[in-house]
Image (spheres, rainbow, N blue to C red):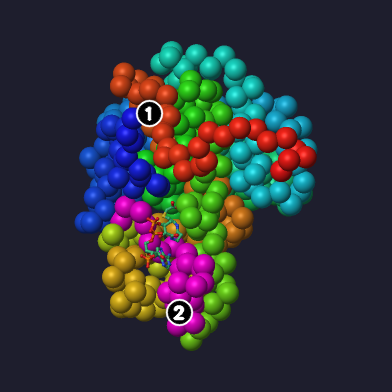
Amino acid sequence: TGMFTYDPGFTSTASCTSKITYIDGDEGVLLHRGYTIEDLAKNSNFLEVAYLILKGELPSASEYESFVNNVTYHTMLHEQINHLVRGFRRDAHPMAVMIGLVGALSAFYYEDLDVEDPKKREIASFRLIAKMPTIAAMAYKYSVGQPFQYPRNDLGYAANFLYMMFGIPCEPYKVNPTLSKALDRIFILHADHEQNASTSTVRLIGSTGASPYAAIAGGIAALWGPAHGGANEAVVKMLEEIGSVDRIPECLARAKDKNDSFRLMGFGHRVYKNYDPRAGVLKESADQVLAELGQKNNPKLAIARELEHIALEDDYFRDRKLFPNVDFYSGIILEAMGIPTKMFTAIFALARTVGWIAQWSEMIEDPEQKIGRPRQLYKGPAQRPFVAIDKR
Ligand code: CMC
């Protein structure tokens, strides 16, 4: 009974109050705790941004050191996880493996179920931020049949991830600082984005008092879809299919055709009706990183730039305020770094874990939050009597 606001896709519903991230979609502004994403991407590093997002302030030198120590302390996985992963087919998508393994952490850390205890919540955040790269790298190593690499705590967060991805026991692995810096920046740009589909999923699951590991597994599942985090993988596939600059008009015609379900991947956003500021940072970063890697003439980057150029001049995209989003350039950089396409969304997930866990914690601490329980407008049949099978 009662009247509800019908709001499919929650386009005009604020589900919570939050002090973490601010987006002005018309102006193309993104702030974490008041700092612009451009400022953070240029001057900070991922673990410092993680601290900021989680705690609300930039850390002092000693707070930073203690935070990094806490995260690195938890980088290893329980050995039993080695057996779990072996149950997957080798060709399983890394996102499927991540959903499974992160969900499984809820069984390993069952004592963390006391979500009301701030100390336990903090340990759960350290564990999740620390273990996510190990899990993502494990999913990759398993898919290529190479031995898992234990985390190396003497390396930075991004460098350790690269080591676990590409290191092999028979050869010393040298971290390329250009690559780890570029990856760290990609992590920063994906750390949080207020109430997107995956974060809302994490909050909804968390609102029932469920384990944070189960809630984050749900976030990973929501992120996987091509309309959300899966778009970075879809962009690279699309650029591959386009193949050459002269085939761009064909692709744009398909994107504009309402009888064709094809969409321009990496374009458009529910909130940004202007250039996604993260895409701006990545566009610059793409030039820089590809030049440093000796791939200045990368054909995909050339197609992407031209595609953007033509789309931004086209009335269809102009009228609908469709601009490049974060996924448009990230895939090109990751690919140039040698990261396989199927790992792109996994990388998004490991960075977004910071936002998920911060939003989950904020929700638990918020006295106004209740179990998430949307209503509906019922359109089905009215009450009617059961009809026996021989009478139907
Ligand atoms: N290509 C072609 N047309 C588009 C696109 C696109 N990428 N995005 C939106 N439109 C059109 C859509 O057809 C509709 O046109 P009309 O008014 O004529 O029916 C209009 O623009 C509004 O679209 P909408 O579907 O109502 O917008 P939404 O807010 O529900 O969807 C979106 C947002 C991100 C799901 C959508 O823009 C999209 O599917 N983009 C491609 C996938 C993508 O890049 N996703 C990444 C999102 S950013 C970060 C992340 O979450 O990973």
Tell me which segment is drawn in magenta. 249-272
The image position of residue 269, as x and y in percent, is: 37, 57
* Residue holding disc 2: 253
Q: Is residue 205 magenta?
A: no
Q: Which residue is mark 1?
A: 1
* Along the line of sight, the residue nearer the viewer: 196 or 246: 196
Identify the residue at image location x=55%, y=28%.
Answer: 213
First-in-chain label (1 vs 2): 1
Observer able to see residue 169: no
Query: Compared with residue 329, is residue 351 higher up or lower down, i.e. above or below?
Result: above
The front one of 22 and 64 is 22
Say what secondary structure mark 1 lies in.
loop
The crowding category of the residue bearing disc 1, from other C-alpha atoms within 10 Å (few below 14, some 14 to 19, many at least 20), is: few
Q: Amino acid at mark 1?
A: Thr
In this picture, residue 331 sits left or right of residue 52: right
Viewer-side label of 1, 2: 1
For label 1, being within 8 Å of ligand 1 is answered no
- Kindly indicate the quadrant of the structure image that contains residue 279: bottom left
Is disc 1 in contact with disc 2, using a CB cutoff of under 8 Å?
Answer: no
Which is nearer the eye, 239 or 137? 239
